[in-house]
Amino acid sequence: MLLKQSVPEYLTNRKNIFVQVAFTALFAYIFINIYRPFGYDSWYKVEKWELIFASAGVVLAGMIVIILSRIVLLRLKKEHEITFALYIWFIVAEIFFMGGFFTSFEIFILNDKRNPMFLMFNAIQNTSLILLIPYTVTILYFAWSDIKKKFESMVQQFRSPSDLFIPIRDDKGRLKATIKCSDLLFLESNDNYIIIYYLDNEKEKKMMIRNSLKNIEKTLRDYPIERIHRKYSVNVKNVKMMIKSTKGYDLIIKSPKTHSIPVSNSYQKRITELLNIK
């Protein structure tokens, strides 16, 4: 059943969560100022510019509910599988908690005398629009980006690794070397530098350039180079095997020298998918 299946990685990715929360805050701010769903401008007589600033404060305060919810979700992800059912419950909880926040705002700040149950029902309806519309837009965008990335990766796999030359650039974007994909082994972070391990006439060599793994990932996203640890990125084409270790899993690299590289827990799912491990 779909509800018992794990959600895609892009729904619990830290970067995507940040984008989703930021877009939701922007949408909520615009929505409240244009649609004015809670009618606060009718009860609280202020100048237009004051209303703009006040609504920004209300939105930011309401986003605290979403931020706290996503922090809980990320922590829960470390210990438990995030299923579609659990993800949906998180969204429902966010709607109700934010609805409660806006109801309290109407009662205690705007001094709205209408029935609290009516205000709560109205707030939940409007909150559903405020959250579900940007959530739907961002989820569709994340899904499209994920499909696009997988398609590009699939197309890339049809090319022989020996036909690919990987550009190696420094932190200024300057080209320092090009290495055949089949010869590139792995990259290791070393403070403000990266050590690149590669083969030259079947002998292992290495070079050091000034850059970071985070920066170089952007230029190597079209190549089979995957981040597996805060200190390491590997050429998936040159992975010999993955073995169980005391702290998780290690990757053994095809090389004249023995290299056993640890895989961080956060990257295990991605690397097992690439290695077609069920």
Image (cartoon, rainbow, N blue to C red):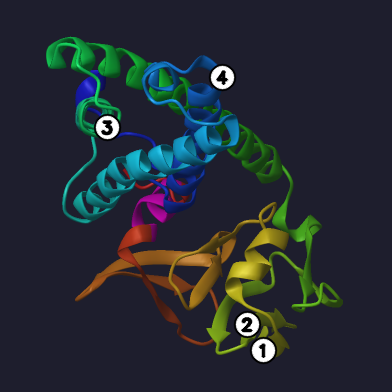
From the top left corner, tell me how far across and down residue 272 is, in percent: 38, 52
Sooner in the amino-acid sequence: mark 4 or mark 2: 4
The residue where tag 4 is placed is 34
Which of the numbered marks, if any, corresponds to residue 197? 2
Q: How far is mark 4 from mark 2, CA to CA?
A: 56 Å
Q: Which amino acid does label 3 sit on?
A: Phe
Is the residue 50 above or below the residue 45 in the image?
Answer: below
**Residue 89 located left or right of residue 220:** left
Q: Quadrant of the N terminus?
A: top left
Residue 206's tag is 1
Asked where in the image residue 102 lies, by quadrant, the reply is: top left
Q: Using the image, tell me which numbered label, if any, was put on residue 86.
A: none
Front residue of 206 and 19: 19
- Of residue 259 and residue 15, the one placed in the foreground of this image is 15
Which structural element holds mark 1? strand
Q: What stretch is highlighted in magenta?
A: 267-273
Q: Mark 3 points at which residue?
A: 105
Q: Is residue 91 visible?
A: no
